[in-house]
Amino acid sequence: MVLGHIDHGKSSLLEAIKDFKITSKESGGITQHIAAYQVEEQGKKITFLDTPGHEAFLEMRSRGAKVADIAILVVDATEGVKPQTKEAILHIKKSGVPAIVALNKIDKPLSDPEKVKIELSKEDFLVESLGGKIPSVQVSAKTKKGIPDILELILLTAEMENLTADFSGPAEGVIIESHLDNFRGLTATLLLVSGCLKTGDSVATSSGFVKVKSIEDFQKKSIKKAFPSDPVIIFGFNQPPKVGEKFKSFFELADAQNYSKNPEKAEQKKEEVTEIFVENNKQKTLSLILKADVSGSIEAIEGILNSLPQEKVSLKILKSEIGNINESDIKLALTGKIVIFGFRVKMDKTAKKMAEREKVKVIFSEIIYDLTEKVTKMMEAIADPEDERKDIGKLKVLAKFLTDKNRQIIGGRVTLGEIRKGALIDVLRDDEKIGEGKMINLQRNKKDAALISKGEECGILFEGTVSIEAGDTLSFYTIERVKKGL
């Protein structure tokens, strides 16, 4: 998976790798909309998946699909880290896949790879030369310098990560593109993750299915079989499959149709990478995206939010930047139930429609105090309630009638408040606690009762190990789960 800022040379680098490994005659048939292709290095195949604007990446991750084994972050060595670079870093971190940094355009006089490395370290993306674990390589899409190095680094990373795939069994994978071909009908590009796909098989997602009459590789060459990491094109779906959907292959078309008709069995429900809150060591986290009008607002809001108490619920600002809420923000929020906060900004029309359709939570505010209060209330809402004891009444023991193992029948008079069936009990003798238990049953005049008030006599069935005597005091209480502040 190749990610980076829009002008930092992702596509140029991919073209350079393609031209370096594939002859012009072979590559002539590749169409512009195909976002995946393969090269061979040291007898091993490497599949590259381009992600313009991170669209495919976000769509796939929002559906819980594993889309790549290794992420390559392309950074312009003359410009350094840009907002979209930071966004790409966030996606890589959330995906959990190993990363490689490609410092591009090193042929230019103003390139400064070391400066870029330092900027990356400020984003907690530390390369090996600065003591981190992320390998980096200096490349030039123009001169093709460093191309062999990045290919070797990919193979080395794959070896160190012990990346393997199952070539047996039915094919499974992810839809990476989908469009209508005027001549061949509904067409999709599939990336295989495991198994083998053959002509004659049937393929299904939760959106549609197809009997596979022909398979094309990324060069539009006809092939009979495809294996893990192969990007392939198939035609003739009954409905357009969605980008990011998982697919499976079947021997019989009827099985594919049944799979497609049953979203539950298909396991195609949109999975969430994270919730609004996630539990980590018994602490919950509220994740949010912050958009504001000016940088001063961003700094002020972040300062106030970071000062909020976080013993019960931690606060994680995944992204903060200036500008209106856009489609990219909504798609990032879709990678989990992440809340978007907008401070003195608006929302693009496209983003608004998507937010409404996907039920993304977007909260606007014009005053910093108001925004802080809304964040605080949301943190309080997801915080675990605490156990709180509520004393309800006391009883003076007048007599003990029966003892059977750990149960006793007690007679007494309520001296304070009221007592209820099912309440918990502390046993007091001379004002000191000597044991505890629970009320199993409550009676008045030998009839079951739910509640006995002050001044009334009653009988209770007590359960507990302590031996109660006449003259003891029983203190009754309940435990309630109460929401408290931060």
Image (spheres, grey):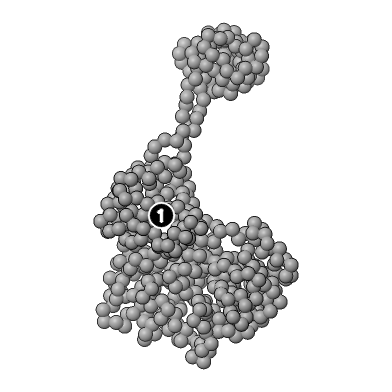
* Amino acid beneath label 1: Ile
Q: Residue at x 54, y 14 (%)?
A: 453
Question: Residue 118, image x and y in percent?
Answer: 29, 67
Question: Residue 34, image x and y in percent?
Answer: 52, 78
Question: Residue 444, image x and y in percent?
Answer: 62, 12
User: In the figure, 402 relative to 27: above or below?
Assistant: above
Quick check: can you spot residue 410? yes
Badge 1 crowding class, 10 Å Cα cut-off, few under 14, some 14 to 19, many 20 or more, is many
Quick check: can you spot residue 94? no
Name the element at disc 1. strand
For the view shown, which residue lies furthest in the front direction?
Answer: 349
Question: Residue 129, image x and y in percent?
Answer: 34, 69
- Counting every numbered tag in the picture gives 1
Residue sitting nearer the eye, 159 or 274: 274
Query: Which quadrant of the figure has residue 252?
Result: bottom right
User: In the figure, 223 relative to 407: above or below?
Assistant: below
Q: Residue at x 58, y 76 (%)?
A: 180
Q: Is residue 240 left or right of residue 109?
A: right
For the view shown, which residue lies furthest in the bottom direction?
Answer: 25
Residue sitting nearer the eye, 373 or 282: 373
Q: Which residue is mark 1?
A: 340
Q: Residue at x 27, y 52 (%)?
A: 300
Query: Which quadrant of the figure has residue 124?
Result: bottom left
Residue sitting nearer the eye, 23 or 335: 335
Q: Residue at x 56, y 75 (%)?
A: 179
